[in-house]
Image (cartoon, rainbow, N blue to C red):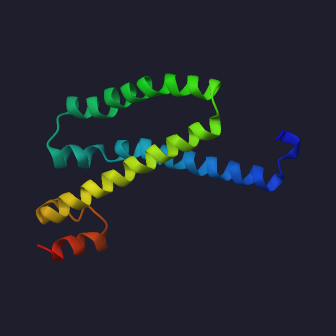
Amino acid sequence: MSASQVSGARLYYATGVLALVGLFNYMDRYGISILVEPIKADLNLTDTEMGLLTGFAFSTTYALFGIPLARMADTRNRIKLLSVCLVVWSAATALHWICHLAATRTNPNLTASRGGGCLNGVSSACNMHA
């Protein structure tokens, strides 16, 4: 399909989806920066440890995956690559919440010590099984 055959509605839809993906990417990226002090206090981390978490680990991940993914975007089907990246990202997010819910379900004190760290309804459900 050439560019002249693509409808305007489809272009707007694709642009909107990519804008949402970008928005969530930046929210995910800067979320930890906003929460540095509460995370540091909660986990008793030093400034060095937080620096490694927010700087070195983040930069290493981008360096390791950014260059190969950029090469793949230049040489392979970008739609499939973007789809695979979105599935992996979504699966990692879902796995995080599954692990978080499992931890708070087996140890409700985790939820209480974090001041209701998970969603309010989930926090209440975790505490009911204690």
Q: Eyeballing the image, is 108 above or below 93? A: below
Residue 59, by quadrant, is top left
* Residue at the image position 28 percent from the left and 63 percent from the top: 118
Where does the N terminus fall, quadrant-wise? top right
> Where residue 88 appears, x then y in whole percent?
44, 44
Instruction: Measuring from the top left, give residue 58's x and y in whole percent.
Output: 37, 31
* Residue 129 figure quarter: bottom left
Q: Which of 111 and 126 is in front in this view?
A: 126
Pick out the residue farthest to the right: 4
Note whether 84 is above or below 9 in the view shown.
above
Q: Is residue 24 visible?
A: yes
Q: Is residue 15 left or right of residue 60?
A: right
Residue nearest the observer in this picture, 111 or 105: 105
User: In the picture, residue 52 is in which quadrant?
Assistant: top left
Residue 112 seen in this snapshot: no
Query: Left of 118 or right of it: where is 27?
Result: right
Side of 16 relative to 125 (left or right): right
> 89 or 31: which is nearer to us?
89
Residue at the location (28% across, 30% down)?
51
Residue 68 x/y as whole percent = 50, 23
Count of marks placed on residues: 0
Residue for point 32% across, 47% down: 35
In x, y percent, where is residue 93? Answer: 38, 51
Position of the C terminus by quadrant: bottom left
Task: Specify the farthest residue to the bottom.
Answer: 128
Against 104, is 2 above or below?
above
